[in-house]
Image (spheres, rainbow, N blue to C red):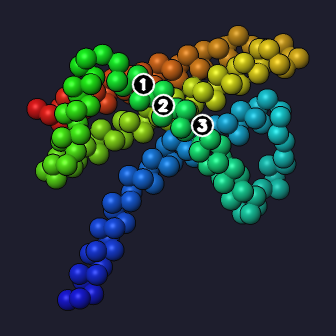
Amino acid sequence: MEINESLQKELKAITTRIPDISFDIYVRLLPGLYALITLLALELVSFDIYKLNWPLTVLILLIAYGIGHIVQPLSGYIVKSIQLIGKESKTLEEAYKLAKDDKTKLSKTNKVNKAHSEANSMASLAIISSIAFVYYQWFAKIESNPWWAIVPILFCLFTYWRIRARHRKIRDLTK
């Protein structure tokens, strides 16, 4: 019986960490990988893909995660600033804080948190693609493609849409 209880405690501890892991993947690792792919596309970094082994793969993932850690505070600030614009938004945030403690609404609050992490991820991708666009336009001595401007704009739109989705999910949560 004790083994079952300790196993349940361990399982509960692991499942409470899952949202943190998904946040790390969404907001830090994916934008970091996008940044590394962008660096490869800009030919600022190069390596032989055929010599890719486990230590190099782990190193690439750690570098990507580190880049994501650098960009994430700025994207989090941008998302939080946009979320708090308007009177309704402030009311929704207060309602979410109250509903977050209600254990019966755990599934719905997880959906709100997921929408928030997706918005942070999109903002990080917008920042990285904007930096790549600025580099290509002004610093690279290469004839740039104007289509590069569409990517940051799309990521900014996706960020805004995810923030609106978060607000919609908070409205559903408080009904």
Numbered disc 3: secondary structure: helix
Residue drawn at the location 51% of the way across and 41% of the way down:
27
The vertical placement of 79 against 137, above or below, is below
Q: Which residue is mark 2?
A: 77
Name which of mark 1 and mark 3 comes first in the sequence: 3
For residue 81, the mark is 1
> Residue 161 appears in which quarter of the rendering?
top left
Q: Position of residue 43 (x, y in %)?
A: 83, 33
Q: Is residue 100 left or right of residue 126?
A: left
Residue type, numbered disc 3: Val
Residue type, numbered disc 2: Tyr
Residue type, numbered disc 1: Ser
Can you name the residue that lies furthest to the top here?
Answer: 146
Q: Which residue is mark 3?
A: 71
Name which of mark 2 and mark 3 comes first in the sequence: 3
Q: Position of residue 8 (x, y in %)?
A: 26, 75
Residue 71 at least partly seen: yes
Q: Is residue 62 left or right of residue 142?
A: left
> Residue 168 appears in which quarter of the rendering?
top left
What quarter of the picture does the C terminus occupy? Answer: top left
Marks 2 and 3, how far apart in space?
10 Å
Numbered disc 1: secondary structure: helix
Is the C-beta separation of discs 1 and 3 under 8 Å? no
The residue nearer to you, when weighing 53 against 24, is: 24
Marks 1 and 2, how far apart in space?
6 Å
Can you name the residue that lies furthest to the left here?
Answer: 175
